[in-house]
Image: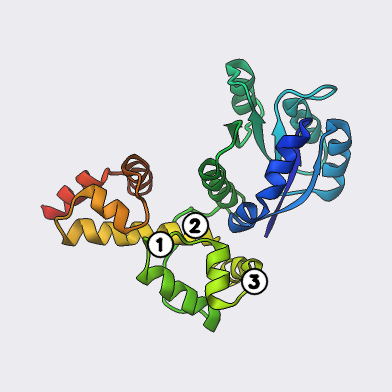
Amino acid sequence: MHTVYLVDDDKIVLDDFMRRRDSFLAGGFRICGCETNPIDALAEIREKRPSAVFSDLKMPELTGIGMLEALRCDALPPPHFVIISAYNEFEDVRRFFSHYRGFDYILKPVSDRDLSELLIRLSARIDKLSPVVRVKAETPSRELNEILKHLTEYPSMNHTLENLGALFSINPNTVCNLFAKHLNTTFIAYLKVIRLKRASELLRTTNITVKSVGISCGYPNYFYFTRLFTKTFGKTPTEYREMGAR
């Protein structure tokens, strides 16, 4: 599992991230530390060498970009950097990406969906894997096999690590670790693959509306489903269906 360090001079923001530890775990990340003082954070990051850092953009004494610049001067490769900010400041963002090759930039308040999507992409970047993984019918783990069967049979349900843990009498952290150990991916990434695979099958073999396909695969928001499907397959659901009909 990857590690992530959180830096923000606003303790409320850090507390909000810490309350969402399960979202980080589901995305394949364990929070290894947090700090409101960027100078102290820099020292801890150098000591702990996390896989990624989530840092506020504007902080007294040292900005998020200044922290990244300092880490890039070290002998070891810097962690992957995600800048978080309440302000959409174009020049700073442009410099972050073009000069420092930062991973991503996210605006406060950070929604659960934005956080989950970012963690999936970040984990894939670190692993140098595609976020789309192959679906497996069986693994060496009986518990994980039962979970995979349940996810495949009921893709439209609101699946969470907590719900699966309660259903199969397993600690949610154990569920997360099973996906990492046996499938080299995260629960959220694998669930997305199952859902989109089912969506592609429905588009090829049925005439139900695209909106209904999304709902039956766990994506009640039509626009989100269409954007996610297009990003994965390179075609909109309608284009994908028409391609299969020819």
Q: Which residue is mark 2?
A: 189
Which residue corresponds to the image point at 53% horizontal and 47% vertical from the top-left?
A: 121
- Residue situated furthest top in the rendering: 91
SS for callout 2 = helix
In the rendered view, would you say 191 is above or below 39? below
Q: Residues within 10 Å of mark 1 (few under 14, many from 20)?
A: some
Residue drawn at 30 percent across, 58 percent down: 216
Q: Amino acid at mark 1?
A: Met
Quadrant location of residue 59?
top right
Query: From the viewer's perspective, is 140 left or right of 59?
Result: left
Q: Is residue 43 left or right of residue 157?
A: right
User: Is 43 in front, or is 146?
Assistant: 146
| N-term-proximal mark, 1 vs 3 | 1
Name the residue type under label 2.
Answer: Ala
Marks 1 and 3 sit apart, C-alpha to C-alpha, by: 20 Å
The location of residue 84, given as percent across then percent down, is: 65, 32
Q: Is residue 237 visible?
A: yes
Render colour scheme: rainbow
**Which residue is nearer to you in this view: 31 or 94?**
31
**Can you say whether 60 is above or below 119 in the image?**
above
**Quarter of the image where the N terminus is located:** bottom right
- Residue 75 % position (x, y): 82, 41
Among numbered discs 2 and 1, the one appearing first in the sequence = 1
Please give the label number shown on residue 171. Answer: 3
* Residue with the mark numbered 1: 157
Helix, strand or loop at disc 1?
loop
Quarter of the image for residue 73 reads top right
